[in-house]
Structures are given as C-alpha cells and as structure tokens.
Amino acid sequence: MMEFRLAADYEPKGDQPEAIEAITESIRAGKPSQTLLGVTGSGKTFTMANVIQRLQRPALIISHNKTLAAQLYSEFKAFFPENAVEYFVSYYDYYQPEAYVPSTDTYIEKDSSVNEEIERLRLAATGSLISRRDVIVIASVSCIYGLGSPEDFKALSVELTKGQTLGRDEFLERLVEALYSRNDVELKPGLFRVRGDVVDLFPAYAKNPIRIEFWGDEVEELTEIDAVSGSGLNKLENYRVYPANQYVTTREKIGSACKAIEAELEERVSWFEKEDLLLEAQRIRMRTEYDLEMLREIGFCNGIENYSRHLSHRKPGQRPWCLIDFFPEDFLLFVDESHVTLPQLGGMYNGDRSRKQKLVDFGFRLPSAMDNRPLQPEEFEKVTGQTVYVSATPADRELEKSSIVVEQLIRPTGLLDPEMEVRPIKGQVEDCISEIKKVAQDGHRSLVTTLTKRMTEDLADFLREHGVKVEYLHSD
C-alpha cells in the first residue's frame, strides 16, 4: 500500500508547527470537529498537507467554487507527486436544468455542455477511490449530488492481467455493459475499436488508449499507445478498466428497476386520471415508457439519474449515493473557506427540490425523481467523519461544533499585515497622486484598486494626464 509522501523544499514555520501538532493530536484522539483559523497567507494549505501526511488517511477537501478548487488541486499535486491527487467538480461548461413554468405553460428541456477533460478527471477520482488508499480528492460542493452506486461501479470494472484467461467476445460484452461504445473509425475517450484479436480501448478517465491483444482466450499483451499514431508507449502487466459513466448499474438491477418504474408509473397515471388530469396522465406515460424502452435496450437513457432510486434499490426518501460513499470510513474531511462552503451545502437541496416539485406535479417526472437530489445538511453530517474547518473568518456554527480552534496567525515569512489607514473621500484622487509621487521618489511602485473596470480606465487616464507613469490591469 502506497503511503502519503509530502514533497516540499521547506519546513513548517511560524504558527504552522503548533497548528499541525494540535490538529493531528485532536484527530487521533477521535474528536469529530476541529477548526483551523488562519489569516490569509499563513500557509493553511501546507498545514492541511502535513496533517494528511502524518495521519496517512484518505482526504476529501471541499471548496466553494471551481477556481479555488483548481488552485488547491495544483498545490496538492505538487505536495504529493507520488500519490493520487484527484479533481472532482461539476463537469458542465453550460447547464440549463429541466424545468416547468406553470404560469406560462413553458417546459424547459435540460440542456448542457459537458467539459470532457473535467469528466475524465471525475471518473479518475472515483476509479482511484475504489482501488487505492493514498487518495486526496479536491472537490466543489457538487460532490454532494447523486452518483451511481460504488458497488456497481466496482462490479462493472474489468481487471486485465497479462496472461489471464479472458475471451475477446466476453471482454467486449463487459465493455458495452460498462457503457463504452464501439467505433472502428474514431478513437476517443469512452470508445473502443476492434481489429481481429486486437482491441484498442480509450478509457474515459485516461490520457492515452490501451491496446489489448488476445491469443485465443488469453490476454497476450497490454500496451499503452499514442492516441494519434497508435505507436506503443508502455508495456503493461495489468490494467483496470473502470466504467465510462458514473451512472452505471448491472443488467440484473436494470431488469428489476424497470419493473419498479412500471409499477410507479401505473400508480401515478391512476392518480392523475382520478383527479381528472388527463393531459398529465398521458404526458407521464409517454415519457416514462420511452425511457423504459431505452433502459431495456441499451441500459441507459437521457435523464437516467431521475430513476436512481429504483436503479439502486433505495427506499422512498432515502438519500442518494454520492462521491463521499466512494471513500473508506476513516477518511478525513477538510472544508475550505467553511464560512462560505457550509451555507452552500444547505442551499443546494432547497433549490433543487423546488424545481423538481413542479416537474412531478405536472407529469414530466415520476415522484421518485425527487430522490435524485443533493444531500441534506443533516445527511451530509452523518456520512462525513472527522472534519477540519479551514477559514480566516469561521462562522459561529463551526466554532461551536469544534473541540479545538487552532489559530495560525504568524506567517511562515514573518510578514505582518500592513497598517490600515482610513482617509476622507473628499480629495481622495489628489491625495492618491501625492502618495504615488512620494513612493516613486523612493524608487518603488504603487498599486491602486478600484470598484469597477470602467473606473480603473478613467483613473489611469487621469493619473497619466498628471504626469504619473501608469497602466491599468483587469480581466479583459
């Protein structure tokens, strides 16, 4: 089993050593909640990395937006180059959820644009979690949304070993069951092609395809190949193929799920007809029967997540599977910027329920679709274990729950916050010019911030007219 190995050219300094020691001891003592209160620039990320390295436990780090999650992902990748550091955020570049507006009788169909690279990273995260322990996942709050069952994801993965007994046709059947598609012309993530006894497969989570060569019912060679030229890159002794989609389920479960969906459909149609809602009854029957046909034929349909309760054999109201279920029981949770992230976790459930209720009431979805949802706050707390809240300004909620609050105020660099001086608004631009010229005389530069981009440009023009060497900088 691989251990977490922290790679850094520097040692903890400032308040970091005491913070690392206090949090580590609190977690070892079995305390459920800790708070790391650290000022900006105090190295909270490095403290988290050291805690993970000391405890040698898988970790989930939740951030409140994609940008901060990407920054953390880059930093932890550098800290743990030999371990599995994964990235799990929403894979939509654009997302318009399915919705219905009764006041205008407007149905809005689900529309989205999936980022293939982020989808690959999400699949890589779930793949790593079911195959190894040295895993750190950097996630946004999308990690509390429903996924397929971890057991089904693992059951539908295929372990390949050089020399093992496995027929080509059996392997192809298992690929299709794992939602890979055959395409003998183009090889892209999620596709495979067959040429005689040679199968080229592009795993949905990998950067390069693999070539599997059969000799009869034996796996003769496993080779990582270049996606463009097809030339061999590395010879492999074994390789694990994970499903091409996180919403996968076994064929046996699909059969029983279809029966349960049919039963719910008949019950719902009867209810609509009893209430004299004939349009809604016809609508739900047509939509659901089409989805059932797709499920029986290919094991997948658009909006399959709305049938997740039946596919995973859950009871009404029971929480859905999510990324957290892929972790072992002893994982660590770090909530970054907890004063912002925790309120987001609570707000997502309420917004999702309000939208879906209308779809159910007007016959666009079965009532079981309500159980495809984000976790409720109390459900999130039940499935997460020992937690470290990380924030410069933690809210009362985190402070009250935490057994210890560790302050990290002295930066490793020893730098202090500059003194803040509040001056009157009147004459502020002239005062700014005066201060800039004083700094320039000492051979230094000045940074001036404004509220808007337009103000940045106007102020730059004004300063230039008064003999100040100036350039503006903003995002466009």
Image (spheres, helix red, strand yellow):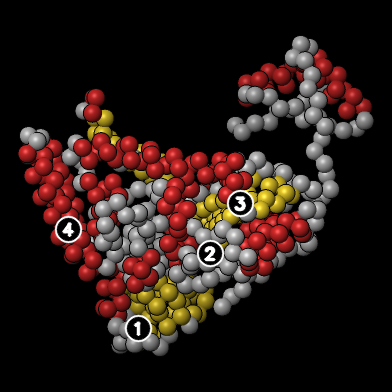
Q: Position of residue 323 (x, y in %)?
A: 44, 58
Specify which label sits upstream in the sequence, 3 or 4.
4
For mark 1, does the 10 Å Cα neighbourhood hold few (<14), some (14 to 19), or many (20 or more) residues? many
The earlier-in-sequence mark between 1 and 2 is 1
Residue bearing the label numbered 2: 331
Determine the secondary structure under disc 4.
helix
What type is the residue that disc 3 sits on? Ser
Q: Quadrant of the N terminus?
A: bottom right
Viewer-side residue, 229 vs 109: 109
Q: Residue furthest top?
A: 426
Looking at the rendered structure, the kind of residue marked 2 is: Phe
Kindly identify the amino acid type of the residue bearing the numbered disc 1: Phe
Mark closer to the observer (3, 4): 3
Instruction: Give the distance between the C-alpha atoms of the residues marked 2 and 3, in whole angstroms.
Output: 18 Å
Q: Mark 3 or mark 2, which is nearer the start of the sequence?
A: 2
Indicate which disc residue 260 carries: 4
Earlier along the polypeptide chain: callout 4 or callout 2? 4
* Residue type, numbered disc 4: Ala
In the displayed structure, 206 sits above or below 96; it is: below
Q: Are marks 1 and 2 in contact (CB under 8 Å)?
A: no
Picture quadrant of residue 180: bottom left
What is the spatial separation of the Cα atoms under label 1 and label 2, in whole angstroms? 40 Å
Q: Nearer the viewer, mark 3 or mark 1?
A: 3
Mark pair 3, 4: CA separation: 44 Å
Residue drawn 27% across and 68% down?
Answer: 250
Q: Residues within 10 Å of mark 2 (few under 14, many from 20)?
A: many
Q: Which mark is residue 402?
A: 3
- Looking at marks 4 and 1 on the same chain, the residue that comes earlier in the sequence is marked by 1
